[in-house]
Amino acid sequence: MLDSLDRFVKLQIPDWHLTTAEILYHMPDNHALLQTFIWQKVDLAPSFPELSRFLAFWQREIEGPLHSVRVASAALTRPAELRYAGGEFRLH
């Protein structure tokens, strides 16, 4: 039953991932200094349209030029994990 449920969930949202981007950018008043900005949103992998829109907005509207962007992505749904307990604790 779990296998069929996992397949059902993957069919509904197959490529949606929690996406985190670490954006390093130059400070507007001193380009020698770098600042970090963390962006996180649910996005469609591997094209990442939300992140692409945000970076386009950044380059168009924000004065601090981008230095680098590091992206991490994790699937929202995974197959169920079942682990047996190594012991038993009784209360009362």
Image (cartoon, rainbow, N blue to C red):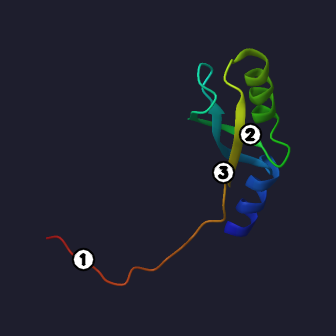
Q: Is residue 38 left or right of residue 8?
A: left
The numbered disc on residue 89 is 1
Which image quadrant is residue 90 in?
A: bottom left
Residue at mark 2 to residue at mark 3: CA–CA distance: 10 Å
Q: Quadrant of the N terminus?
A: bottom right
Residue under label 3? 76
Q: SS of the residue at dot 3?
A: loop
The disc labelled 1 sits on which kind of residue?
Phe
Which image quadrant is residue 57 in?
A: top right
Residue at mark 3 to residue at mark 1: CA–CA distance: 32 Å
Question: In terms of depth relative to the viewer, which is nearer, 53 or 87?
Answer: 53
Q: Position of residue 47 (x, y in %)?
A: 86, 43
Sooner in the amino-acid sequence: mark 2 or mark 1: 2
Q: SS of the residue at dot 1?
A: loop
The disc labelled 3 sits on which kind of residue?
Leu
Residue under label 2? 43
Local crowd size for mark 1, using a 10 Å CA cut-off: few (<14), some (14–19), many (≥20): few
Residue shown at 66%/61% (left/top)?
Answer: 78
Q: In the rendered image of this protein, does residue 5 appear above or below residue 62? A: below
